[in-house]
Amino acid sequence: MADSLSVAQGREYLAIPGPSVVPDKVLQAMHRPSPNIYEGELSDMTDGIIPDLRRVARTRHHAAIYICNGHGAWEAALANVIAPGDKVLVPATGRFGHGWGEVASALGAQVEILEFGKSSPMDMDRIASTLREDAGHEIKAILAVHVDTSSSVRNDIAALRAVLDDVGHPALLMTDCIASLGCDRFEMDDWGVDVMVTGSQKGLMVPPGLGFVFFNDKAAARRSELPVVSRYWDWEPRANPEEFYQYFGGTAPTHHLYGLRAALDMIHGEGIDHVWARHARLAGAIWAACEVWGQDNGPLRMNISDPAHRSHAVTALRLETGQGTALRQWLEANMGLTLGIGLGMAAPDDPARHGFFRLGHMGHVNGQMILGLLGGLETGMRALGISHGRGGLEAAASVIAGR
Ligand SMILES: *Cc1c(COP(=O)(O)O)cnc(C)c1O
C-alpha cells in the first residue's frame, strides 16, 4: 500500500495555461488605494504604457486597450472590421479558432471554417487554394490563432502572410496572440499582420481584465468604411484619445494599469528576445522530459508530435491510460501543483477526455519552477503507478543546463 502524505503546503504553482502566475512585483504594484482617474499619475502612466505595449507586439501601429478578457478582445477586433454578411475564413487548429469564429458568426459574419484537426498546424496549401477559389474577394478577413491553447499547436503566421501575398488576396490578416504574446516570438509588422488581439492574463502576467487590439492603417481604413461600429468596441477614440477617459470608454481599469506597468517593466528589463529564448529553453526541457517518460511503453504522449509546431507557452498531453484527471487531482492535493484540464479534445460524455491535460509555462516562469513542475509530474506518475521511461528529469536538466 502506498504511504501517502500530502506535501502540498507551501507556495503553490498554478501551471494552467492562463491565468498565469502573477509576479509579486505586479501584485505589489496593484496593492494601493484608488487613484484619481481624471488627471495625474494614472493618465501619465497610460501614455507610457502604449509604446511599451507596441514594443511587445513588435508594431509601430495603433494600440487600443479594453476592459475585458480575451473573448472581449476577439469581439472588439471584429466589431471594427466586419459588417454583418461579410465573409471570414477561420483556419482552425483547436478550440480557440472555433471560438473566435463563433464570435464572428454571432456578429452576423458568414464564417467558413477550414478544419485542420486537433493536433496539426495549418496547412498553407489548403489555405492558398481556398483563397484562390475566392476570385471575387468575398473573404474580408482571416482569423488565425497563433498558438491554439487547447491543442498547444503554434501556427506559422509569417507563412500565412506569404500565402495571402502569393495569391494576391486583400483579406485582412487577423491573429489571436492571447496565449503567445510575450512567450513565443511574434512580429506583427515584419510578418504583415493587420490586426492582433491579446489579453492581460497569460504572457503579460497581469490578472484577467484587460484586452488589447493592435491594428495597422489598412485595418483602420476598413473601420472607416463600416456603416456602424459598436460604441464600446470602437477602437478609434481608444487609439487616439483627446480625453483620458476615451482610452477606456469610461472609468479606467485603475489597478490593472499599475500591474501592467510593472509587468511591462519586467518584460523590457529582461528584453523581449530574452523572454522568447527563456520560454523556448524551458519548453524544450518539458518536451525532453515528456519524450523520455513516453518511452518503454509509457502511456504519456505530447499532442503535437513535431517540435517545430509546438508552442513555447503551453503543452497539451495525454495519458493513454486515461489517468490525466487523476494525475491532476493527485498533484493538487499532494504537491501544491495545479495542471490545466484538457480542452476541446474529447466530447464531454467521452470517458477518453480524462486522459487529456495541459501544462501552462507562460510568463513568470523560471528554471526551478519548470523543474518543480516536472518533478511533480514524475512524482505523481510514480504515486499513481503510471509507467514511464526513466531519466525524464535528467533530460530536462540537460536542456536547461545547455549540456
Ligand atoms: C485564453 C485564450 C482565449 C480566451 O481568453 P479569455 O480571457 O478566456 O476570454 C482566446 N484565445 C486563446 C488562444 C487563448 O489562449
Image: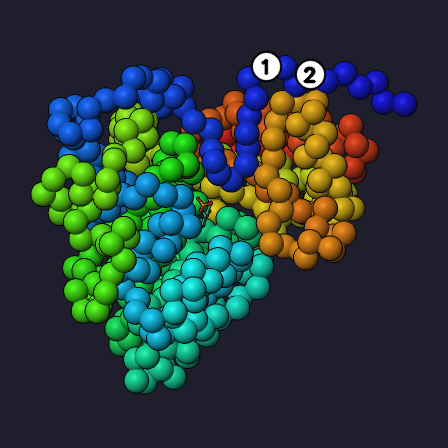
Q: Residue at x 66, y 22 (%)?
A: 335
Task: Tell me the number on the disc at residue 7.
Answer: 2
What amino acid does circle 2 point to?
A: Val
Image position of 43 (left or right of 358): left
Q: Is mark 1 within 8 Å of ligand 1?
A: no
Residue 334 in the image: state x and y as whole percent.
70, 22
Residue 29 in the image: state x and y as whole percent.
31, 20
How far is the residue under mark 2 from the one under mark 1? 8 Å
Q: Are marks 2 and 1 in contact (CB under 8 Å)?
A: yes
Is 6 drawn above or below residue 39 in the view shown?
above
Image position of 297 (left or right of 84): right
Q: Residue at x 59, y 46 (%)?
A: 316
Colour mapping: rainbow
What amino acid does circle 1 point to?
A: Gly
Residue 272 in the image: state x and y as whole percent.
30, 36
Image position of 229 (left or right of 198): left
Secondary structure state at the residue bearing disc 2: loop
Q: Residue at x 63, y 54 (%)?
A: 345
For label 2, the crowd category at 10 Å Cα-Cα, with few meaning under 14, some 14 to 19 and many 20 or more, is few
Name the image quarter holding the N terminus: top right
144 and 77: which one is in front?
Answer: 77
Residue 143 in the image: state x and y as whole percent.
38, 62
